[in-house]
Each structure stands twice: as C-alpha cells, then as structure tokens.
Amino acid sequence: MKSGRQAKLVGKPESLSLTRARRMNKADVTTFFEIFENLLNEKNLFGDPARIHNADVTGRQLNNRPEKILSVKGKRNVMSVTAKGRGETATVLACVSATGVFLPPFVVFKVKNVKQEFRNNLPPGSVVFMNDSSYIIIEHFRKFLEHFVTHKPQ
C-alpha cells in the first residue's frame, strides 16, 4: 500500500471461484475486448448501441432472512420468525441494451405448483415459469429468445 493511504474495512468480500479468478488476467481480458471490437466492426454496431445487448443469469433463494436488529448487550436467543427454512429458489435471466433499456425479466421458480403471487409486482411483459428445477434449460432459453424478439429493447 502506498504511504499515506490507510486501509479500511469495507465489509464482506464477494465469493469468486478460482477458475474465474484465473481468467481475469490482462492477456485474457485484452483478447476478449479485441474479439468484441472485431465483432462490433464486422456487424457495424459501433454507431448503434440499441442493437447491442447483454444477458445474464442469476439465482436467488427466496427465503426471508431477517435484517440486523438492536438488542440488549448479552441477551441470548434473539430471533425473528421467518417463512420456510430454505425457501424456494428462482433464476432470473435479465437483458439490457447498451443504451440502458431493460427487457422485462424472465424468471424460473423451483416449485411444482403455479403460484400467482410469484407474478405479483413484476414489470409488465415479464415471463414466469414453474419447474422442478430453477435452472434454465434449453426449452426456457428458446422461450427467452422468443421473449427477446417480442420485447427487444430499443
């Protein structure tokens, strides 16, 4: 650390797999951006960011984790009642254009029975699937591509 700079505690670090950490090196990142630049040139997309999109998948557990609370020092068994122990899981496939316009989300819940409340409060045009697994399978990805064509951000 440079002199005059102090370290400070910023919170818990995010997890990063060893494979991802190894791929985040200057040579691989440079190669990625060279390939990306060539693709943008080849498809004539540099002047048209609305045609550039990024999609990513994230998984979430839907159990209720209680917020931190204040308690009397030394008190034991400070608890908060929540729903199920593990809760359901959901996978969200999100997509945004380079202009910052989002596609309505595409969500897969790991539940056997359709639950209307999972659709509540989602943006208009959102797609919800219920499945034995919350993983995105080929059928879901095909539906996502149809969803993309229908709701493509401009």
Image (cartoon, helix red, strand yellow):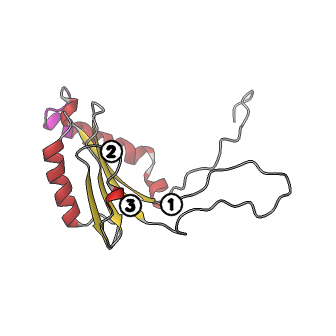
* CA neighbours of label 2 inside 10 A, class few (<14), some (14 to 19), many (20+): few
User: Observer-nearest residue: 142 or 132?
Assistant: 132
Residue under circle 1? Answer: 18
* Amino acid type indicated by mark 3: Ala
The tally of labels here is 3
Q: Residue furthest right?
A: 74
Where is 149 relative to 100, above or below? below
Q: Is residue 103 left or right of residue 26?
A: left
N-term-proximal mark, 1 vs 2: 1
Residue under circle 3? Answer: 90
User: Observer-nearest residue: 153 or 123?
Assistant: 123
Quadrant assignment, res 6: top right
Q: Secondary structure at mark 1?
A: helix
User: Observer-nearest residue: 108 or 29?
Assistant: 108
Q: CA distance from mark 2 to mark 3?
A: 33 Å
Residue under circle 2? Answer: 31
